Image (cartoon, rainbow, N blue to C red):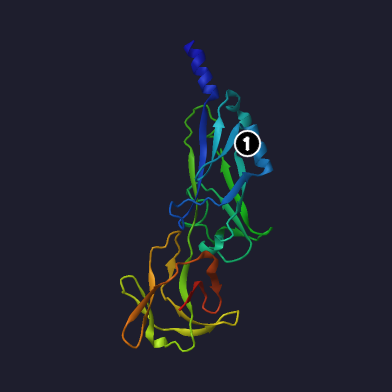
Amino acid sequence: MNLYKNTFQYRTSIIKILNVDIMHNYFEDGIFKKYEIQPNLETLNLLKNYNLIFKKTETGFVILFQKEERFFSENYSDELKLIFKIKILDSNFLSYTNLPYYSSLNLSLKNSDDRIELHDGDFVNKTSLNTPYEAGINGTISLTINKSNEIFDQSNKYEPKNFLMKFDSRDVKFRYNFMADDDLNINSLYITNENRSLKYTDFKKRTLSTGKEVLSILIDQSVKLKERFNDKWFLHRSDDMLYEHSIFLPKPSLDKIHYDKSLNIFINDMYCNI
């Protein structure tokens, strides 16, 4: 009876073959979730033929192997190439992600023997891009496994592989734009941070694409975007009686980020009436 029970457990046991985590340091928890991913048709057939299971997780996906004795033979000793199609679903993705600012990108990620990352460097970068073949931000994750028949080997000593795909958040500069009356005294204004360790007074008149004229000031330090921005900026204004007014300035907004060709930087524009 014990022998039968052990054999039954062996035949129905499931082991993890590999795990892929998809991360982004813009988000508080470091996890990127705004995508869809699925095996391509050829991979679906391979998964079925080799008793492999594709399963999504909170941080990415795993490939599982449901053990059966018939797979531990020469017929299953070849290496396998699994290809997964990924599609980014967030329309603001390029606003906060450090990748070339094009409307269409083709991501190409793959595993190697000496790295847990599926890309060169610590983050997905331009070396992981191919010529786009469809609109939007799409791509493939190619995983080559069982190179030495390590999975379907009867020794049963396989160690699961962990892989990482990580995006970096974009560095931007903030520009505050103020709609003000024509008689406003620019010299009475300055922008400062919460502890007043920084102070900016170099306001410039700028004409928006709408024809509206604004007073703008560019914060010269770049900031790495985060889902929750904790820094606070204030506009201070002194009147003729030396009475000072303080206005809390709006926080960054992803839909206001754009690439400024003339300055060769990414700018997060924010607008305020004074």
Query: 211 and 224: which one is in front?
Result: 211
- For the point 50% across and 66% down, the residue is 253
Query: 246 and 205: which one is in front?
Result: 246
**Residue 31, placed above or below residue 265:** above
**Residue 125, placed above or below residue 33:** below
Answer with the quarter of the image where residue 103 lies. Answer: bottom right
Residue 265 is left or right of residue 51, and the answer is left
Q: How many marks?
A: 1
Q: Position of residue 106 (x, y in %)?
A: 62, 58
- For the point 49% across and 41% down, the residue is 161
Q: Quadrant of the C terminus?
A: bottom left
Determine the residue located farthest toward the top in the rendered image.
1
Q: Secondary structure at mark 1?
A: helix
Q: Position of residue 108 (x, y in %)?
A: 59, 54
Q: Residue beneath label 1, please? A: 47
- For the point 43% across and 54% down, the residue is 28
Q: Position of residue 114 (x, y in %)?
A: 47, 48
**Residue 100, placed above or below residue 155:** below
**Residue 214, placed above or below residue 10:** below
Q: Amino acid at mark 1?
A: Leu
Residue 237 is left or right of residue 130, and the answer is left
- For the point 60% across and 79% down, the residue is 210
Q: Residues within 10 Å of mark 1 (few under 14, many from 20)?
A: some
